[in-house]
Amino acid sequence: MSRLSNDHISSLLSQYLDGVLNEQDRARVEELVAHDASVRREYDELKKIRDLLSQSTKLEPNIAFWTRLSTRIEEHKEAERLLPFPGRYLPTAALAGVVGLLLIGVVIFQNRMSLFHFMSEKSQAVQSVYEEGILKGSIYPLLSSIDNNQVLQFSLLGVLPLDAKAETSLRVDQNASNGYQIKLGKSAKKKSKPITVKDFYAEIQATDKQRQVIDSLFGLAKKRIESSVLVSDNHAVAIDPALAQLNKVMVSNIAASLEPFQRVRFGHYLEKKDAPYTFISRKVVPVDPESIYVEMNRIPSLHRFVVITADSMTYAHLNPEAIREVQRSSEAALRAGKQAEQNLEMTERLLRRYAVREPRSVRGEQIPPQPFEVWGDANTVGIDIKRELDEPRWEMREPVVIPLHRRMQGYTIATPSGRIEFGFYGDTLTANEFMMDSAMVRFFNRKSPAEYNLRTMDSIFSSFNARFQKHPGGFSLDSVLRSLEDARRRAFEEGKRQQSIQKEARAKLRDPASNNP
Amino acid sequence: MGPWYTLEMSAGKDGSGFLGLAGTFRDSKRLGTPLTTDRTTERMQNSGKPASSSYAEKSDEVLITLFQRGEREVYRILVQRYQERVRNLIYSIFRDPGVVDDLAQEIFIKAYEALPSFRLDSSFYTWLYRITVNKSRDEMRRRKVRRFLSFQTLVDEANAELTSKLSVPPESRDDKEIVALGLQALPEKFRSAIVLKDIEGLSYDEIAAILKCELGTVKSRLSRGRSMLRKILQPLLEEN
């Protein structure tokens, strides 16, 4: 056998490893390996390297890959549409191409500019969320494929399961200190039976029209929920604290769209399901569904988020543009189909992240007068929202929603022309619909009912010479219901009276003979 | 009760009582969006069921044909089918998790743009891998320029890291990791060939198609690359 060069031997060994040699060459290599110690060693080493390479570690799958990509493709299409010429004319319209590129640049630039508000807080945490999250498009809604059953469950019980088995959930609640609480994590041991929209409609005997209204309310709530809990690839989570009140508003709105007898059923249903809220004044006439829908659509948001990273937190303004951006990606995710498993995985990642953290270190980072506190343990990430938080004012519908088992705080206003009595359940003003003098309008145009105490009320009403007195012992539900009914009856009578006056006047106009006997 | 409920409304007409008053301090101009014209809600309801379930079993070729006829939504299936392979291919080439997702996104966007003119003259993944290898090459070039480093410096860096890893006692060492790192010290054309062959397990023909070179070139790159790798990893191999 002729002597082979080292390079030639290496090449043969390499091909032998890959199994691509012909019969003759293979025999030659096998003979060399068997008889030449250095060739044998080279073969063993090459084989070892190849084996190690073939076992090389794989990356963890990226579950958000498509969500992010689809958003970018959408943007790409958007930019394409901005091109002033169809693609095939592009070579002859090089200038147009340049213009298009400029436009894309401007679009991207503007998007980024509008996000700069997000950095208005000096916090390093926000900055890193901003830079790593939003710019790269890797901030996305935690909840992106919730169905109506889940929205209903959230609306009535304040619990939103994050996975199919409901082992993790998003919970909102009124907490002991008269504020709210948002919790994200392992579900409570006691599991409530899942609520379905179908059962619910059957229970309250909803008509087709009502179903349509309530379904569209679910659609709005869903959008709201989706844009309220955002997560980023780098394990930051941003939560809109106003979410804590959404379920209350939903109960109120659903109740408003129902007939009195259905409200009674709805009330029973809430009690049966151990819901945190119920409502009073079950006899009020249903509200025009369109106005419910329109107003629900306009629920104010301050676009301020509690942003939590692994080691810091802040309360940051997130530009509406940015939220819309996130919402777009949410819709894309929706198109991509079910994501329940992904939600679960995401929550678990968050939990793992927060489990190792001492609550103390979280608070240590807190900027002193924050109106909320973030805490975390092995199972849950929680935000306690105190009452001072300048939250958006959620207007309560008639019938007014009250937390179950809570005592009402009552107030009396004495004005020169009489007395007004009203009360609060938590921050819910029960008498907000029937006090309509201008003082009351001013009263309601103020920021947040939560902020009222006797002194501020006094100052608001001082120009009207009114005094506030705390009602001894509060009001009973009965007296409030009575006053509501009373006010309604009077309004109705007055309406009738006005009607008859007008009718008379019209009759007179139509019939000149009666004027001119 | 005093006359504090000033009645300035006409809502009493229909008997709805004081509820009609709501409009006086809520902006009545807002009312007017008819319930049925809300597109968002419709879209949400309609999009509940993904139409894609039937696509999932279709072959790449069928999906591409559908895509080229305008059914752009099938792209999701293609992406989901190949995203992890592309990500891991990039990871094997760079060994840097930080670069993987951004580059993978770029690759799939590039593929989305180019797919309408793809003529199915090779298989989809060969084509996709070719884009991946090209984009990775661009990225490497960009990194080199940006960092004002010669390739030799990169090789030296990888070697330095390798040496430090090798000085760790053998029992706490991850040999797979070291080999993967050693690969980083190879010039790009050898590295790509080895990644495609030994990690991705492709055939010579496929590699030739992806790298757009002759079969003989693939052979020689693999052989030379492996010899280089063997030299670099000599300390590891000698220990065993």
Image: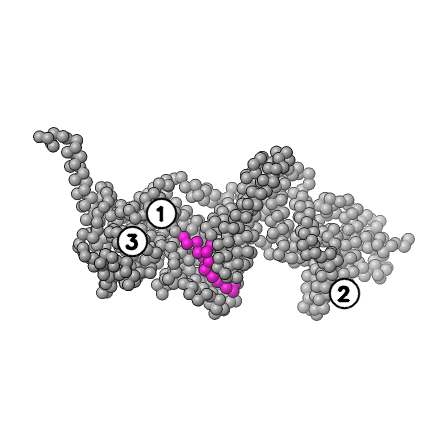
Do the residues at pointers 3 and 2 share their chain?
A: no
Q: Residue B119 at what x, y percent from top left? A: 66, 37
Q: Which residues are magenta?
A: A301-318
Q: Amino acid at mark 3?
A: Arg
Q: Is the residue marked by circle 2 packed among few (<14), some (14-19), or many (20+) residues within 10 Å?
A: some
Foreground disc of the pair 3, 2: 3
The residue to which callout 1 is attached is A295
The chain letter under disc 1 is A
The residue to which callout 2 is attached is B235
The chain letter under disc 2 is B
Q: Amino acid at mark 1?
A: Glu
Q: Which quadrant of the rendered structure holds the C terminus of chain A? A: top left
Residue at 61 percent across and 40 percent down: it is A98
Q: Is residue B101 left or right of residue B45?
A: right
Foreground disc of the pair 1, 3: 3
Check if mark 3's residue and mark 2's residue have beta carbons within 8 Å. no
- Which element type, helix, strand or loop, lies under badge 1? helix
Q: CA distance from mark 3 to mark 2?
A: 82 Å
Foreground disc of the pair 1, 2: 1
Q: Is the residue marked by circle 1 packed among few (<14), some (14-19), or many (20+) residues within 10 Å?
A: some
Q: Is residue A288 magenta?
A: no
Do the residues at pointers 1 and 2 share their chain?
A: no
The residue to which callout 3 is attached is A442
Residue at 62 percent across and 35 percent down: it is A93
Q: Residue B51 at what x, y percent from top left? A: 51, 42
Q: Is residue A448 visible?
A: yes
